[in-house]
Image (spheres, rainbow, N blue to C red):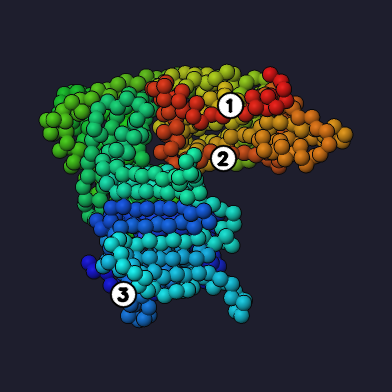
Amino acid sequence: MQYGAENIKILEGLDAVRMRPGMYIGTTGSKGMHHLLWEIVDNAIDEAANGYADHVWVTLHTDNSVSVEDNGRGMPVGIHPQKGISAVEVIFTQLHAGGKFDASNYKYSGGLHGVGASVVNALSEWTTVEVYQDYKAYRCEFESRYDETEKKMISGDIKSHLKETGKTHKKGSKVTFKPDTKVFDMARFSFDTINRRLKELAFLNGGLNITLTDERKLDDAGNVTTVDYCYKGGISDYVEYLNSNNEPKFAPPIYLEGEKDNIYCAVAIQYTDSYTTENIFSFVNNIPTTEGGTHETGFKSALTKVMNDYARKSGVLKEKDDNFQGEDFREGITAVLTVKMQNIQFEGQTKTKLGNVEARPAVEAIITERLTAYLEDLKNTSVGELMLEKAVQAAKVRMAAKKAKDIARKKSALEGAPLVGKLSSCTGRKPEENELFIVEGDSAGGTAKQGRDRRFQAILPLRGKPLNVEKKRLDQVIANEEFRSIITALGTSIDTDFDITNLKYHKVIILADADQDGAHIRSILLTFFYRYMKQMITEGHVFIGVPPLYKIEKSSTKEVVYAYSDQERTEACARLGGRTTVSRYKGLGEMSSEQLFETTMDPKTRTLIQVTIEDAVQAEHLVTVLMGDKADVRKQYIIDNANFNKVDLFAKEKGVQ
Ligand code: 0R9
């Protein structure tokens, strides 16, 4: 379809956006600022998804402005019939202008809010738009400024109308904008966040080239940092990347796609020897659906149904046998599911769950048809057999685990009170207010027990290291005493039996030493929550406690300050002045109960880091790197990422060993 300037709907001005930025971009923090970038990137990706562009460039400049360029058709430069200005100007100055709200436009992406380029302009200090079309280059400029006569901000006003600026062989569009520091104070574009998302987008849009350049980051030779992504295999490449630290059972991944009732769906599937239930990463219109939703449900039921049919046909299930359960076909699975559809609706705690009811039957029908055809193809017989073997094993484990759970349940029923061993519970009976500290070691556990506010703080000391969950099967995890006491203390059960409504502590705080062992225990516990109680993380119940690294005492006045980093230590010494004594805490156990409470446990003074699954993909990757099959990869990761030298540096400065 030819998109003419007349298609553009004009609704309202940009000042409203500045008055209430949160309504349009969620927050005015770093996340909201990145949202502006995603809005423009989405427009470039749309052009690529429609088949007109194959390269998108993102460049971070030193003044915190950013450029996005594509090599598509170029935004329309024609004059808008009612407004008498160029279509580009309309897109950037009129709220809701553009095709996104028009169902006749076959557009899928459009970000979480789909607010459009005008919102980006409204919240930027300045914006420039360049268009390269028919061998001509065009440019127009916008700015936001304070108007002295009207005594108010004028947002995204035209500064220089669209005009031809020269000849070019380039094709496409380029948008550069600088988020206004009056809206987003202090926020800076994060290379890591942008890099991660662009890589994800490159996987989700197979064949698309994405180049990220950071002009703020120079290498040793003084060159700017540039990364390029292009995955010809799309989501199949994504699955292989996710499994790169585990041995896949077959390659390449199974790839299925189709379209039904205006819903497009594609999935790539591969299995590894891991015992974990499932790693299904789903997306709708390129947006991650961390909490799953109707598309995932459709996929899972198709997988279960087709595989059970296949098991009967091939004689693995006999007439008298019960069907396999869905989870049996998902043990060790890594899958990426992407769906494209219109009018998406999100639900769930973090609004990352697809709610559209029509997605389920469409996805189920597509996957049922395509997976059946895949398995009927004789060259895929060995893959089908591997999947069945895996399910047979998983079903055995499931039945063994059920037995173990039944025994545990009977045991606790017999003993009346649940088996919580070393737990020192709190007196308060309101789960919303209660906190459970999981503390490394009996001695620190004892200190925490003495220091706590027993009205709402419970302490569960962990003896030594709990076992490494990644390597263990569910029945072994349940059999482990350390995990059992956590599960019993929380009251939620785990895995498919997990029920968050029974949660007895709404804050679970992991308290471990700031050393290598502590880091290991933290990652084991996080892996445990991630694997078997994922909702605890997605709903924000899991925290890391941050104990101080140093105590600084001013010799003359005995004033005491705690420092949580080397920088804070230096600052504190400077602030106190005079002679100071700095002592380093090697572990939680070295603190008195009062000190531990004041620095680490008291809600008024402590620092907690909330554990989120901002990016489940990244978490999963970390978990497999740290806990997976390949010891050499794990070792390299620890060498690359850990900074255990800090403590030694301190020792060196002080001349001690
Ligand atoms: C720099 C990031 N890229 C963009 O923002 C971008 C928007 C855009 C575009 C068209 C082509 N390239 C683009 N890049 C376009 C779309 C259509 C017709 N001609 C050109 C169409 O959708 O039919 N546009 C996105 C919206 C619009 N153009 C407009 F038509 F609403 F103006």
| Disc 2, SS | strand
Given residues 272 and 320, the one toward you in this image is 272
The residue tagged 2 is: 610
Quadrant of image for the N terminus: bottom left
Q: Can residue 293 be seen?
A: no
Q: Which amino acid type corresponds to the residue marked 3 in the rendered image?
A: Gly
**How would you rate the neighbour count of disc 2 (Cα within 10 Å): few for under 14, some for 14-19, many for 20 or more?**
some
Tell me how far mark 2 sits from mark 3, CA to CA. Answer: 50 Å
The kind of residue tagged 2 is: Gln
Q: Residue at x 80, y 32 (%)?
A: 580
Give the quadrant of residue 185. bottom right
Residue 418 x, y percent position in the rendering:
56, 24
* Left or right of 615 in this view: 1: left
Disc 2 Cβ-to-ligand 1 distance below 8 Å: no
Q: Is mark 1 within 8 Å of ligand 1?
A: no
Who's the residue at 20% across and 38% down the image? Answer: 371
Give the number of the disc on residue 78.
3
Which amino acid lies under the numbered mark 1 shown in the image of this protein? Phe
Mark 1 vs mark 2, foreground winner is 1
Q: Is residue 98 above or below residue 546?
A: below
Kindly state the secondary structure of the residue where label 1 is placed.
loop
Which circle marks residue 644 in the picture?
1
- For numbered disc 3, what is the local secondary structure? loop
